[in-house]
Image (tube, rainbow, N blue to C red):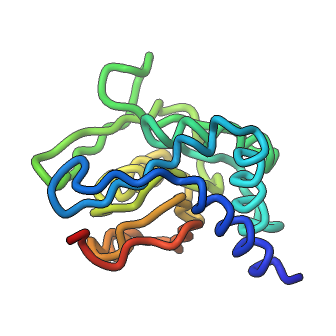
C-alpha cells in the first residue's frame, strides 16, 4: 500500500468519527466536530500517524500550533516528529517579549502573538490547526514565524472549508487530512 493510500484509509476512518452540526456557528455552515477523535486513543494515534506519513522524512524543527485547537494535537505531533512545539496565542497570554500580528476574521479582526526567542532563525516549521476557513489566522501564524526568522515549510489542517479559499492566502504548501467542504451548507 502506498503512503497516499494509507493516509486515505486513515482519513476515511477518522472522518467517520466526526459529529456534524448544521448551521453552527452560523447559518450556512456545517460544523464538523473533530473532538470525538480525542476521546478514543486509537483514533488520536491514527490522526497523528496520518500527519506523520504525510510529513515523511521532511526536516522539521518545530511544530507551531494555533490557539486553541492547534494545541490539541500539535504537541503530540511535534513529539512524534522529534521536533519542538511552539504555541501561538492571543495577546497577553505569553510572558516576555512577543511578536504580534493583527489579522482579519470573517467578522472583524483579531491578534496573535509568539514569544520572540522561541524559533531560532532558519528553523523549518510546520503550522498546525484544526480547520482552514478564510485563512486569516493561519496567515497570521505564518507572518509570526517569518518575524521570528524561521520558515514555514507547510500548513497542516484536519479539515478545510474549501469554498472560502483560505489556502490562497498562504505562502507555503497546504495539506488537509480530511476532505473539505466544497460549498456552503444549504
Using residue 29 as the reference point, say whether residue 155 is left or right of it.
Answer: right
Residue 5, quarter of the rendered image: bottom right
Which percent across, then down, holds residue 90? 33, 31
Which percent across, then down, holds residue 49? 78, 56
Q: Nearer the viewer, residue 50 or 82?
A: 50
109 lies above or below 157: above
Outermost residue, left side = 108
Q: Is residue 78 visible?
A: yes
Q: Nearer the viewer, residue 50 or 20?
A: 20
Identify the residue shown where x is 24% and y is 72%.
Answer: 184
Which percent across, then down, holds residue 89? 40, 32
Using residue 101 as the reference point, say whether residue 64 is left or right of it.
Answer: right
Q: Quadrant of the C terminus?
A: bottom left
34 lies above or below 87: below
Q: How many marks?
A: 0
127 lies above or below 97: below
Which percent across, then down, holds residue 148? 48, 45
Q: Is residue 120 visible?
A: no
Identify the residue shown where x is 15% and y is 45%.
Answer: 109
Q: Quadrant of the N terminus?
A: bottom right
Outermost residue, right side = 1
Outermost residue, top side = 95
Identify the residue shown where x is 41% and y is 50%.
Answer: 141
Using residue 94 as the reference point, say whether residue 13 is left or right of it.
Answer: right
Amino acid at each position: 500500500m502506498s503512503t497516499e493510500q494509507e493516509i486515505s484509509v486513515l482519513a476515511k476512518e477518522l472522518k467517520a468519527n466526526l459529529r456534524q452540526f448544521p448551521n453552527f456557528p452560523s447559518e450556512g455552515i456545517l460544523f464538523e466536530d473533530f473532538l470525538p477523535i480525542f476521546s478514543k486513543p486509537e483514533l488520536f494515534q491514527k490522526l497523528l500517524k496520518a500527519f506523520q506519513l504525510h510529513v515523511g522524512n521532511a526536516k522539521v524543527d518545530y511544530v507551531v500550533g494555533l490557539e486553541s485547537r492547534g494545541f490539541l494535537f500539535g504537541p503530540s505531533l511535534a513529539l512524534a516528529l522529534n521536533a519542538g512545539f511552539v504555541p501561538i496565542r492571543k495577546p497577553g497570554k505569553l510572558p516576555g517579549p512577543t511578536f504580534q500580528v493583527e489579522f482579519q476574521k470573517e467578522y472583524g479582526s483579531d491578534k496573535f502573538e509568539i514569544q520572540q526567542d522561541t524559533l531560532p532563525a532558519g528553523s523549518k516549521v510546520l503550522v498546525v490547526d484544526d480547520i482552514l476557513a478564510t485563512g486569516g489566522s493561519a496567515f497570521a501564524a505564518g507572518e509570526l514565524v517569518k518575524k521570528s526568522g524561521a520558515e514555514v515549510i507547510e500548513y497542516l489542517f484536519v479539515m478545510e472549508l474549501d469554498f472560502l479559499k483560505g489556502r490562497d492566502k498562504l505562502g507555503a504548501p497546504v495539506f488537509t487530512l480530511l476532505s473539505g467542504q466544497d460549498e456552503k451548507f444549504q
